[in-house]
Image (cartoon, grey):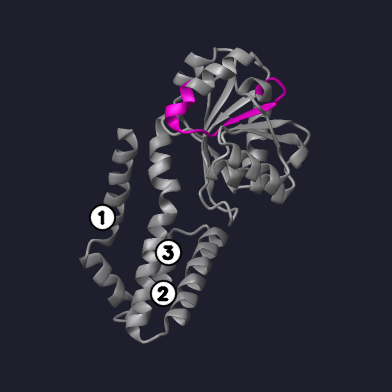
Amino acid sequence: MKNNKIVFIGAGNMAEGIIRGQLNTGAFESSHISIYEILESRAKYMVDTYGVSSVGTISEGVKNADIVFIAVRPQDAIGVLDEISKANNKQALILSICAGITLDTMNTHLSDDYRIARIMPNVLIEAQNGYSGVCVNANVTKEDKKVIEYILKALGQTMFIPETLFDEFTAFSCAGPAYVLYFANALIDAGVQSGFSREDSRSIVLANLLGTSQMLSITGSHPYQIVDTMTSPAGVTIEGLKSLNEDGFTGSVMRCVETAVKKAKSF
């Protein structure tokens, strides 16, 4: 897999993050990565910063590639797909992170012979923890899935999902860190209100978030099982949880995700 040649069509921020992840983890060497980028200044930056090569046309990049990674704006995707089709490299695995571009759309503009995957990448690239969602067409093999997992391992974990859940994955998983960050910020403010310095409050919240996540992972317990061990009769913790319940905390979180799903489906 490491010797596969991969070309990125588009070298924006997301593509850069993925490339950086590949190089930092040693998944690919820079000599096996090329980019096609219409902005010369951006292409030069990528070449100078990461040692990748730049190709002059989409066709040039696709013809020599084992993997084609489409990372352009949705409004540019159809033109890119048509150019990939002209290159006629049906042996290449096609990966796309273009928002709103479905497998059917890609099949239509390429052909039924191509192996195609649609990816919603993990946004926590620097942490290398968090799921990328992947849906594939019928031509993608078990070996192809291993290649996809190999590439995305540099970003975090990989979850193969039906395309019918792609918008839900976007709103729940990819937007999820933003919800957690909002909650974390609220807890930090609560700590400051309680009398801690912002620095100490932040340290406490980060440790609690990390420790709680690890506890759930290690024990496999339902969250409420762990909560139950922390709440004594007429105690401090149950009193705080009572306030969250009175304010409809669970319902608010569920409505948040539901609203985000509706927005994702509107594109």
Answer whether residue 155 is magenta in the image.
no
Residue drawn at x 41%, y 34% as measured from the top left: 165
Q: Position of residue 136 (x, y in %)?
A: 54, 27
Magenta-tinted stretch: 62-78
In the rendered image, is residue 232 in sight? no
Please tell me whether mark 1 sits on a helix, a strand or a loop.
helix
Please tell me whether mark 3 sits on a helix, a strand or a loop.
helix
- Describe residue 45's horizontal placement relative to residue 240 as left or right: right
Residue drawn at x 42%, y 80% as measured from the top left: 198
Determine which residue is flagged by label 3.
225
Taking the view exactly as shown, the residue that stands out farthest to the left is: 246
Of pointers 1 and 2, the one earlier in the residue sequence: 2
Q: Nearer the viewer, mark 1 or mark 2?
A: 1
Kind of residue at badge 3: Gln
Of pointers 3 and 1, the one earlier in the residue sequence: 3
Residue drawn at x 55%, y 28% as measured from the top left: 117
Residue at mark 1 to residue at mark 2: CA–CA distance:
22 Å
Q: Is residue 70 above or below residue 238?
A: above
Q: Position of residue 119 (x, y in %)?
A: 52, 35
Determine which residue is flagged by label 2.
230
The quarter of the picture where the C terminus appears is top left
Determine which residue is flagged by label 1.
251
Give the number of marks. Answer: 3
- Describe residue 216's horizontal placement relative to residue 16 as left or right: left
Kind of residue at badge 1: Gly
